[in-house]
Image (tube, rainbow, N blue to C red):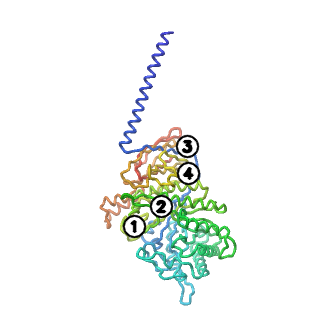
Amino acid sequence: MRVNRDIGGLIFSIMNRAFCVLKILLSAAFVFFSVHSFLLGQELVIIQVHADHTLAPLKPVWAYFGYDEPNYTYAPHGRELIEEIAALSPVPVQIRTHNLLTTGDGTPALKWGSTNAYTEDASGHPVYDWKIVDRILDTYLQAGAKPFVEIGFMPEALSTHPLPYQHHWPKDELYVGWTYPPRDYQKWSELVYQLVSHCIARYGKTETESWSWEVWNEPNIGYWHGTPEEYDQLYDYSVDAVRRALPNARVGGPATTGPASTTAAAFLKQFLEHCARGKNFATGKNGAPLDFISFHAKGSPQVVDGRVRMGLANNLCDVDEGLAIVASFPEFAHLPVVLSESDPEGCAACSARVYPQNAYRNGPLYPAYTATAIRNMLDLNQRHRTNLAGILTWAFEFEDQPYFDGFRTLATNGVDKPVLNLFRMLSLMSGDRVEASSNGRVDLDEILRSGVRAAADVDAMAARSEHGMTVLLWNYHDNNDEAAPESSVQLNIAGLPASSEKIVVHHYRIDRDHSNAYTLWKKLGSPQDPDAEQYATLKAAGQLQLLESPRWVQSKNGDLVLSFPLPRQAVSLVKLEW
């Protein structure tokens, strides 16, 4: 028995020592990996996706775009870009533009456009001319997009303060004659009725019923030189005219600025109260038709210590406050909400050459910002139990401007910018949104309080369809620090179906060196007159690019692990097909 005890003790001692050695080796390996990652400037971020945990259908809320200058729509690069963005969604992209009723000869300028839809003859009788309006709407529909019709602005012949009428921004006052109430609401109402009737005659009743009709733009600031009650009056007469021509038309507003402002919030509240219980100026009845609610949300970038610092918190606070206001009206809480402008700041035509805080626009910071903004807006929508239907990016293109001059655009002289590739990534996502978590995520409430100012937000959003799934990942920080360390990402996907044992992986990337024509343009010497070969190379660099060649992988028991580095301000889309 003693021999057996001695042998047992010896075995126990050996096993104990072996276990200690194993612990030392594992600790050493962990320390080595940690030190190695530290020396490489990397942080290990674990992103967990549960492919079998469905949250909700993934609506393409990002499939909305808009711009100030309608006459760029049918310009050569404008038409090309309309066709590109129309291909970005399984459902038709919706496009909104200012100045559809503004008086002028159709010559575009920064923050200006016109259609000359309404003038009057010497006797004061209306003269309607839809030629330019038709060119704009035809371009959308021929590309497969839908108009999100913004009813505005005031024709010169109807304005209560017509002169001066056309601004010459930025040299003089922006908000001139086109921003004033009508001198005759009956004539205004008839103009809107004739516009809708013309669209029905040209495009058909069924097509026109599929559009959204929004009354005016940002009536709580200089775009409307009237009181809130006068806007309610404009809304009532406009909606009554739309519905007289098209009884099933989808109408809404008020397209106010960000509700984080107390004055903007008050305007939105009084408008909703008017629609719920106020006396209708056009019909004399109580309330006004309202099929969707729109407001705007903007960030606030700054230059701090010589570099751009984004203001994501401002953007999200606008959404948070606006959705809270909508949710406070039980009769409207179910209605679709459209952020009919949602952007990192408020002036698309303000070049970064003049406004250095806008220097985020040419590179990957813009798409990284937009990716995390969309994810957090969807979470705010879930928090408030509202119906967020659209997040509209107010960016298009400017003809005959310098290459990469820092306007908020999707393309420059026909060369696509990195932000457009984010929307190409989003267009590849379909099906149901599924659960995704990250130990690198910055909490939503922290972002609302102070933005992304400490650790970076390394996070993901995932969707699953019948024969595949997609995971959108980003590494975002408010500070545009190109020297910041990249993160090492471990993407763990669980709950894959049994049919997914063999999977093909496509990994798309936006960063400094991928899907980024701006980097190439600088390497070419920043040419303002690129030759044909350079231009073709820039066009190609502006397209969505793979990080690596597609490859086959195998899942095990419904699990898959993928590892890769993700630089600061980079976005990846991992697409799995089985």
For the residues labelled 4 and 1, say whether their Cβ atoms are less than 8 Å apart: no
- Give how far across and how far down residue 301 sits, in percent: 43, 61
Q: Which mark is residue 351?
A: 1
Type of amino acid at the residue the image marks with label 3: Pro
Where 38 falls versus 305 (above or below)?
Answer: above
Type of amino acid at the residue the image marks with label 4: Arg
Looking at the image, which is closer to me, 479 or 79? 479
Give the residue pinned by disc 2: 299
Type of amino acid at the residue the image marks with label 2: Gly
Looking at marks 4 and 1 on the same chain, the residue that comes earlier in the sequence is marked by: 1
Give the residue pinned by disc 4: 433
Label 3 Cα neighbours within 10 Å, binned few <14 / some 14-19 / many ≥20: some
- Give how far across and how far down residue 285 sits, in percent: 70, 73
Q: Residue furthest left?
A: 525
**Mark 4 vs mark 1, CA separation in Å:** 37 Å
Type of amino acid at the residue the image marks with label 1: Ser
Q: Nearer the viewer, mark 2 or mark 3?
A: 2
Helix or strand or loop: what does disc 2 sit on? loop
Q: Nearer the viewer, mark 2 or mark 1?
A: 2
Residue 542: name its quadrant: bottom left
**Mark 1 vs mark 3, CA separation in Å:** 49 Å
Give the residue pinned by disc 3: 497
Residue 321: name its quadrant: bottom right
**Mark 2 vs mark 3, CA separation in Å:** 40 Å
